[in-house]
Amino acid sequence: MPDDAPHSVRQYELGYEEEGRLRGFGSACGFRTATWALLCPRCGERDLTEVELGRVGRIAAVTVQTVPAEQYLNDAPYAYLLVDLDGGGRVTGWMAGVSPGSPPTIGRRVRFVPGYRRGVQFELLPDEAPRG
Amino acid sequence: MRETWVIGAATTRFGKLAESAREAATRVALAAIDRAGVDPKAIGATFVSNCFGVAEHQAHLGPLVNTGLGIPETPSMAIESACSSSSAGLHEAFVHVAGGFTDVALVVGAERLSHLDTLRATSYFAMGADDPFETRQGATFPGLYAAIASAHQDRFGTRTEELGAVAVKNHANGALNPNAHFQRPISLATYLASPIIASPLRLYDCCPFSDGASALVLAAREVSRRPSAEPLVVRASARAGSIADLQDRPELTGIPASRRAAERAFRQAGLTPSQVDFAEVHDCFTIAEIVALEDLGFFPPGAAARAGAEGVTARDGRLPINPSGGLKAKGHPISATGAAQVVEVFEQVNGTAGARAVPKTEVALTHNVGATGGSCSVHIFGRR
């Protein structure tokens, strides 16, 4: 699929890797996501709209992995997160500087950190930095 | 639909195969055929699962298995549904036999990854997840199920010790299974002392990488005049799907495909969860067993962890779960797992489960999940 297609996996990657934004799609049912589909996975709607997702949100689920994925060999331990973004949409990403004994808690505020590193990287908002 | 029976079942020991998946698949298929007491030439269709055959530089396993069984002209097909591959194969075999397209069908699942190092094996397993939106964002399979566990803990207060109770129970059962990968019981203290792999999941929350092969023979009742073992009557064979990515599902504490497949299966069978005597459920991680028991309707949401810790799901409990040891202790050779669950039901119903025999075996359920629940099979079995 060409880079200028309405929504594509490559376009999402270009968004977080080079443009510093999270691109996704929205559906008439209100569902918003960064993943890829031709029709809405929730309601089947064909008419999907390209959207820019928020950069700040709350942790919906979290784990600190001590055994890394192949592309994160030098980053363990790191957190794998599901984040509910302000304005709608839940995305996945990762966060450095965490401990498996005291993982970030669900509900903590995080923000997307645009940068040169792989994946969608998040950080805890400054006023909720880890203790100790 | 024709009444369909499982008339033969066999498995290798799970752990490390000394031979290729092709050889193990063929050998275990012949064992199942012999146990069924049928001529291999009676098989009208073969359904083979071997997700990661490419790790052995081998695809198109079906014709090789059939050739090895002396039935090269029998049609075969590969069925891939990640960890639920051979239960998907069972479903397809059921459709063929119950629908009258063939009288006898063979289901085989085999996997061999032990020749790979941990990183490469982990990378193969990760292929069942969404590469750009899960794996390349840092997720491993322990990480994905750990995310589910974190949400379950947050919503229901599920405790570490309750996760540990699943591991202790299934290792105790595996210790009684001569085909299990792990055959030693563990204590809760051992569980708690094991390292965190993906918080809150520890090493003993995770199933092992296993090699293994399992096979089933299905036949229409009308052609099974004198089965050589007590057959399993397939009372329901149901499959369902979920949105593939966890993050796109409306909730994180259950697997929609499990619920849908269970609803369909109970409707087909005309039964309710309370009528099931025992079950083999998909416990790739301890949290997976807890979530499965809630999705299948055995316990209300948030109640399964405590029930397990109180012994309800032990071999001598009200609802024995995973008497084989489950994926957790028996092992999880991806493509063999679904068929192996049915092998355990076959052994229990035939009275050949030895010390791990459960008290009642009139109605049994198997539940097999692909990846984090993008696909799921539920089968219900009864007696003649």
Image: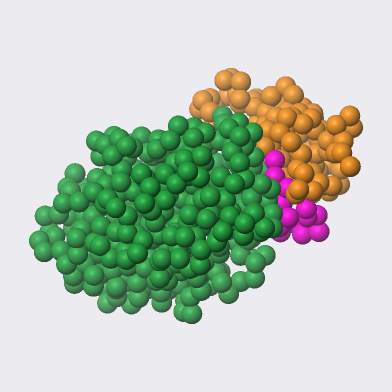
Chain colours: A orange, B green
Q: Is residue A39 shown left or right of residue A60?
A: left
B158 vs B135: above or below: above
Residue name at image x 89 percent, y 42 percent: A132
Viewer can see residue B13: yes
Q: Is residue A83 left or right of residue A123?
A: left
Q: Position of residue B223 (x, y in %)?
A: 12, 59
Q: Which corner quadrant of the image does residue A26 belong to?
A: top right
Q: In the visual, does A102 lie left or right of B34?
A: right
Q: Residue B307, percent across and down?
A: 47, 40
Residue visible at 61% across and 41% down in the picture: B159
Answer above or below: position of B44 versus B363.
below
Can residue B137 be seen from the camera position used here?
Answer: no
Front-most of A45 and B308? B308
Towards the viewer: B325 or A58: B325
Question: Residue B217, image x and y in percent?
Answer: 26, 62
- Residue at 83% across, 41% down: A18
Up/down of B134 relative to B124, above or below: above
Q: Is residue A77 magenta?
A: yes
In the image, residue A61 lies at what x, y percent?
Answer: 67, 37
Image quarter (top left, top right, bottom left or bottom right) of the N terminus of chain B: top left
Give the residue displayed 35% in from the left and 72% down from the top: B28
Q: Per the image, is B211 magenta?
A: no
Query: Hey, which quadrant is residue B149 in on the image?
Result: top right
Number of numbered discs present?
0
- Magenta residues (range): A62-78
Foreground of the two, A69 or A41: A69
